[in-house]
Image (cartoon, rainbow, N blue to C red):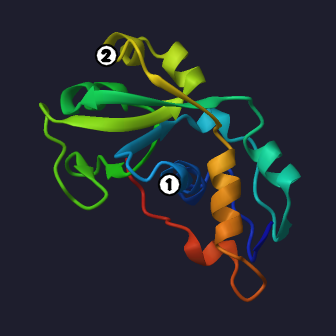
Amino acid sequence: MGNCRNLILFIAVAMGNLVTDSWFYTFPDADVSITNSGGIRQNINQGSIKLLTIVGLLPFENSIYELNLTGSELIDCIDNYLIGGMTTIGRYTLSDRTPIYSDSTYSVLTTDYLYSADPDFSIYDQEPNNTSVNYRQPLIDWIKSMNTSGQNPLNIFLDNTPRR
């Protein structure tokens, strides 16, 4: 499937960014992606990346839900989560540095697990779109699309920038 030059720790900023950013590969019209660090369970070791690596990394049978949230609802929901497509450092902005406006509506990706575990999600969007896509599938597809190898390892595509 792919190749990794150096160990990527499951607790590293780059790993959370890798998972949340990969969802945009499958859902390019989404604005923000949100997951929890507890859903990421192992490192990606140096060498060949196999399907079993990704299943161990993201071991649950979670589906991706797509929600429509206003900017103020989104800000209420993001505490303590890993986020893609935006940053909370300094101020709330999308990855292109566009401010999050409280009255604008945003397409937000999260897992069915977080949707059911966080009451804010279900209060703000009572009818989310269950995409029926397993939360690991976008990562698998994205890694395959990058054609990683020993000369083109996954590590060169990682974003180590903190977003919280």
Q: Which mark is residue 52?
A: none
Compared to 157, does 138 lie above or below? above
Q: Position of residue 138 (x, y in %)?
A: 62, 50
Q: Disc 2 marks which amino acid? A: Tyr
Label 1 crowd (10 A; few <14 / some 14-19 / many >=20): many
Taking depth in this image into account, of 6 and 118 the one nearest to the observer is: 118
Q: Disc 1 marks which amino acid? A: Asp
Q: Which mark is residue 21?
A: 1
Q: CA distance from mark 2 to mark 1?
A: 23 Å
Q: Position of residue 49 (x, y in %)?
A: 82, 64
Name the residue beneath numbered marker 2: 124
Label 2 crowd (10 A; few <14 / some 14-19 / many >=20): some
Compared to 119, does 101 lie above or below? below
Q: Position of residue 141 (x, y in %)?
A: 67, 58
Q: Position of residue 132 (x, y in %)?
A: 62, 30
Instruction: Choose top left, top right, bottom left or bottom right for residue 111.
Output: top right
Taking depth in this image into account, of 72 and 126 the one nearest to the observer is: 126
| Residue at 87% from the left image edge and 50% from the top image edge | 52
Q: How many marks?
A: 2
Question: In the shown orientation, is residue 97 left or right of residue 61?
Answer: left
Lower sequence index among marks 2 and 1: 1
Is label 2 in a helix, a strand or a loop?
helix
Quarter of the image that includes the N terminus: bottom right
Is label 1 in a helix, a strand or a loop?
helix
| Residue at 65% from the left image edge and 35% from the top image edge | 39
Taking depth in this image into account, of 11 and 24 the one nearest to the observer is: 24
